[in-house]
Amino acid sequence: MTRALITGGAGFLGSHLCELFLERGHEVICIDNFITGNPANIQHLIGREGFSFVKYDVTNYIHIDGPLDYVLHFASPASPIDYLEKPIQTLKVGSLGTHKTLGVAKDKGARYLIASTSEVYGDPLVHPQKEDYWGNVNPVGPRGVYDEAKRFAEAMTMAYHRFHGVQTRIVRIFNTYGPRMRIRDGRVVPAFISQALRNEPLTVFGDGSQTRSFCFVTDLIEGIYRLLMSDEVNPTNIGNPNEMTVLQFAEEIKRLTGSNAPIEFRPLPEDDPKIRRPDITKARTLLHWEPVVPLQEGLTKTIDYFRRVL
Ligand code: UDP
């Protein structure tokens, strides 16, 4: 049996990864300190064969007994509100946490995968975003703590690959949604769904003309698994190229929830990217991967989840 260490394993993406790894016959050691992760996300895995959990902050030295085949570093605050509230933790987990987890991978001879982000492209001047675009990031703006931590994480990962010969993979994750997102993490999907279900105004930032492209979580996790099992060392975009404006997205949530809640416009946050859509040619060609869950189907599952937890 192979063993995987998954940091941030009690988070939104991490918990879905833990499940997939268990389903595919790997042992999973899940680490989380619950800064933004949630014990409820892994409650159903506790006691399951092959699963173990350690509550720990991965910016400190990590010791794991026994062999490891894979290390996946998914621990990080991941919503703009979270980085505003936890700027230092965001920088530390992307920098120190990446260093510590790479150290474990090197020590154990394990394959390493870092969760990077479309935020490395910043407010992009190239559209759609391809992996060879270097980005347009404001290092000192409010989002800089996340963007620069992830850019550092990519650089550190490549350094461990080039200097220490660690087998590394870099996934650039675009906007993803699905069950287990935190209701109050401030991101547009939980915000609009919970507002619609409570019949409160949907808060559209700016004039709502900024675009995003939303990927359902099961599609994303499958893409990440394929990338890990591939030979591709350079960054790879995983996301859904189905782009829409935030205003269109608000209308879609109203339609699917059957809500009559009004739409209210609020100021656009600083450095909010105006457009975002992944070019997934590389994932399609190399991993034979593309998203298969249509928006309406994914959103219906997500809305069902929020109805249960609200
Ligand atoms: N947004 C919005 N209302 C909200 C939350 C977010 O209009 O209540 C917008 C936000 O300004 C951004 C987009 O939705 O343009 C996606 O925001 P999110 O926080 O989900 O993540 P981002 O893609 O900016 O990292």
Image (cartoon, helix red, strand yellow):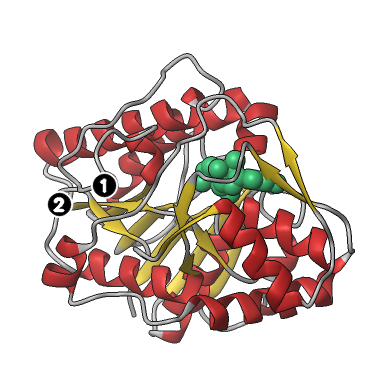
**Residue at figure coordinates x 11%, y 44% from the top left:** 165
Residue 233 bears which disc, if any?
Answer: 2
**Residue at figure coordinates x 65%, y 74% from the top left:** 302
Measuring from the top left, give residue 178's x and y in whole percent. Answer: 59, 69
Residue 101 vs residue 168, the one in the foreground: 168
Say which quadrant the N terminus sits in: bottom left
Measuring from the top left, give residue 292's x and y in whole percent. Answer: 37, 82
Say which quadrant the C terminus sits in: bottom right
Residue 118 vs residue 43, the one in the foreground: 118
**Residue at figure coordinates x 47%, y 14% from the top left:** 140
The local secondary structure at tag 2 comes to loop
Residue 77 shows in this picture: no
Determine whether 204 is above or below 267 in the image: below
Measuring from the top left, give residue 180's x and y in whole percent. Answer: 66, 66
Asked if labels 1 and 2 touch by Cβ distance under 8 angstroms, the answer is no
- Relative placement, left or right, of 283 versus 264 is left
| Mark 2 or 1: the one toward you | 1
Query: Which three-letter amino acid code belongs to the residue tagged 2?
Result: Val
Residue 208 shows in this picture: yes
Q: Callout 2 environment at 10 Å: few (<14), some (14 to 19), or many (20+)?
A: some
Residue 95 vs residue 281, the one in the foreground: 281
Query: Which three-letter amino acid code belongs to the residue tagged 1?
Result: Gln
Ligand 1 within 8 Å, label 2 CB = no
Residue 129 bears which disc, if any?
Answer: 1
- Relative placement, left or right, of 103 versus 215 is left
Label 2, label 1: how many angstroms apart (C-alpha)? Answer: 18 Å
* Mark found first going from the N terminus, 2 or 1: 1
Determine whether 247 is above or below 93 in the image: below
The local secondary structure at tag 1 comes to loop
Determine whether 71 is above or below 45 in the image: above
